[in-house]
RNA sequence: GGCCCCAUCGUCUAACGGUCAGGACACCACUCUUUCAAGGUGGUAAUACGGGUUCGAUUCCCGUUGGGGUCACCA
């Protein structure tokens, strides 16, 4: 048998946004395909007409594109293949591997209740119906579903990340594979599709482990070869619970909005559950691809640490030339309704670049320098003011006197520093005690570029106005 | 509850029988800058517990505990 190129798929259902867990699963599939020279296929599992929508599909496509995860085939829509799903289900029925079940939802509900809820398993009563009775009911057009007769034997597979995983058929239900409206159930559709698409490696979330024995049983019933299964661990919130809405941002779109760079997001996500070894962390796309291996995936779930993500984003940010950052910052500023006009943002971005973790943070800092209306006193600024007491305002007054006499043409970083230094020395004060209040008055924050550079960027008129306002209002 | 999966610093992780248990984020200190970061240097911090196997267990086996997933005519 020739060694065929691997074929993997990412198969989201368009019932919500692209979750970071889904994005990571897609990333692993993509890395594996690129690494092995295989095909990465995008399949939209839209068989749940109730919850699926085109808008959600578009969000998922956009999210993948943003992350730079391009697919070789697709998107293919599962909904377009119901005919095949139906045929496959009926084939199992005709081969005696499945049977018709006439129990209504109400009857099943009653059975479930009678069995005491949690441990309920369909008892197979319709499987014991005489053939004549089944034929009679069908002739009467009595609604029915098709149930798969679960083999009462061990069902196991060699998982690429977990090793051998084994279930027993006796613990599994005779699952419905075709609804009474003749539409397929998930496990049926997935197996039918994966066989038809010749998928060789199924890389998906841990939450599918319990679906896998059911699917393995179906592969066996169809006489189809098993793909390699690789179940990657979940992503949890900081409290150790499954990552969900209440943990804040869970959609990749949220991170895009926060000004996380796609390359940083990709790098961070890759490391959440995978380690290339040798203490590698910041990696280029090419390095990730060449180092990636399913065997190196983690078995235990990982906690999503947004602080580390921001750190990593900062690393990427500081390596990007300012020119490339300009359009991104302008986009944020526009969203913040900050008027940029024809102003060249280069000096502003240079000033805040190494101090920002996200594009959004960068834009906010630029806005502060551009327009005093964006200055807001933060906690650390407030703390400094409180700590210094009267000395705070005194420093601002001294700064105003000192800076006020600088002629407009001489308003530059060098002159400003020279004057302030001289004044501090003359007054016997530490330079920092003079500069830190200025920083807070001008930016509202204790973090900024060197104060003299800050004042030059902000400009004389606005700087003095801010200092005056802060001195009067005592901040 | 049944079934299944998992278990190294607070977090992400390295180690694939022999290491002072390494790195990163965060935190702390120092350093550089007559100033804020960044950077540099150093520090605090982990093998859940109990049994085995072995000359030797983070590593292999069993149990306990803890956490997670899943149990639909959803996907």
Image (tube, grey):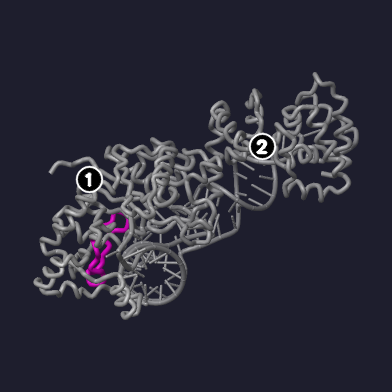
A331 sits left or right of B63 in the view: right
Which subunit holds the residue at mark 1? A
Residue A149 in view:
no
Quarter of image, res A289: top left
Q: Is residue A132 above or below residue A347?
A: below
Single out the residue that lies furthest toward the left: A132
Residue A165 - label:
none
* Residue for badge 2: A365
Which quarter of the image is occupied by the C terminus of chain A? top right
Q: Is residue A231 left or right of residue A362?
A: left
Which comes sooner in the sequence, label 2 or label 1? 1
Q: Dot 1 surroundings within 10 Å: few (below 14), some, or many (20 or more)?
A: few
Mark 2 on the same chain as mark 1 = yes
Is A161 positioned to the left or the right of A215 in the image?
A: right
Q: Which residue is mark 1?
A: A197
Is residue A154 one of those drawn in magenta?
no
Q: Is residue B6 above or below residue A397?
A: below
* Residue at image location 89% in from the left, 41% down from the top: A394
Give the residue displayed 22% in from the left and 64% down from the top: A145
Quarter assignment of residue A89: bottom left
Give the chain of mark 2. A
Q: Nearer the viewer, mark 2 or mark 1?
A: 1
For this view, does A465 lie left or right of residue B46?
right
Question: Element under label 1?
Answer: loop
In front here: A60 or B22? A60
Q: Position of residue B20 (x, y in %)?
A: 49, 57
Look at the image and give the residue range highlighted in magenta. A158-177
Q: Position of residue B22 (x, y in %)?
A: 49, 50
| Outermost front residue | A140
Secondary structure state at the residue bearing disc 2: helix
């Amino acid at each position: 048998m020739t060694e065929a190129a691997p074929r993997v798929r990412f198969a989201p259902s368009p019932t919500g946004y692209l979750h970071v867990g889904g994005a990571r699963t897609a990333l692993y599939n993509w890395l594996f395909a690129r690494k092995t020279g295989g095909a990465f296929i995008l399949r939209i599992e839209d068989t749940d007409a109730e919850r699926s929508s085109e808008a959600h599909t578009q969000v998922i496509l956009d999210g993948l594109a943003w992350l730079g995860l391009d697919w070789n085939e697709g998107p293919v829509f599962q909904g377009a293949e119901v005919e095949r799903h139906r045929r496959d289900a009926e084939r199992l029925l005709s081969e005696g591997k499945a049977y018709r079940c006439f129990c209504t939802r109400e009857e099943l509900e009653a059975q479930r209740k009678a069995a005491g809820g949690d441990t309920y398993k369909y008892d197979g009563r319709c499987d014991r119906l005489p053939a004549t009775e089944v034929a009679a009911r069908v002739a009467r057009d009595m609604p029915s579903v098709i149930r798969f007769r679960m083999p009462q034997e061990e069902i196991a597979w060699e998982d690429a990340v977990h090793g051998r995983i084994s279930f027993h058929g006796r613990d599994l239900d005779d699952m419905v594979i075709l609804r009474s409206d003749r539409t397929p159930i998930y496990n049926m559709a997935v197996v039918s599709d994966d066989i038809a698409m010749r998928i060789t490696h199924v890389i998906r979330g841990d939450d599918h482990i319990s679906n896998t024995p059911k699917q393995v049983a179906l592969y066996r019933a169809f006489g189809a070869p098993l793909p390699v299964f690789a179940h990657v661990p979940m992503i949890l919130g900081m409290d150790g619970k499954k990552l969900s809405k209440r943990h804040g941002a869970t959609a990749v779109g949220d991170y895009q909005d926060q000004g996380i760079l796609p390359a940083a997001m990709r790098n961070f996500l890759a490391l959440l559950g995978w380690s290339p070894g040798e203490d590698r962390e910041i990696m280029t796309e090419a390095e990730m691809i060449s180092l990636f291996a399913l065997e190196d995936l983690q078995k235990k779930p990982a906690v999503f640490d947004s602080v580390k993500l921001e750190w990593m984003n900062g690393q990427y940010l500081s390596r990007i030339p300012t020119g490339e950052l300009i359009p991104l910052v302008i986009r944020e500023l526009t969203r913040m309704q900050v008027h940029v006009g024809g102003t060249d943002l280069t000096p502003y971005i240079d000033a805040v670049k190494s101090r920002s973790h996200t594009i959004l943070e960068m834009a906010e800092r630029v806005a502060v320098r551009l327009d005093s209306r964006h200055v807001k006193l933060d906690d650390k600024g407030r703390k400094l003011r409180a700590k210094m007491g009267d000395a705070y305002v005194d420093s601002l007054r001294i700064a105003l006197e000192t800076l006020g006499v600088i002629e407009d043409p001489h308003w530059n970083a060098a002159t400003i520093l020279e004057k302030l230094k001289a004044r501090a020395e003359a007054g016997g004060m530490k330079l920092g005690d003079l500069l830190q209040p200025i920083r807070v008055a001008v930016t509202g924050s204790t973090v900024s570029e060197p104060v003299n550079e800050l004042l030059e960027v902000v400009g004389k008129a606005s700087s003095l106005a801010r200092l005056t306002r802060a001195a009067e209002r005592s901040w």
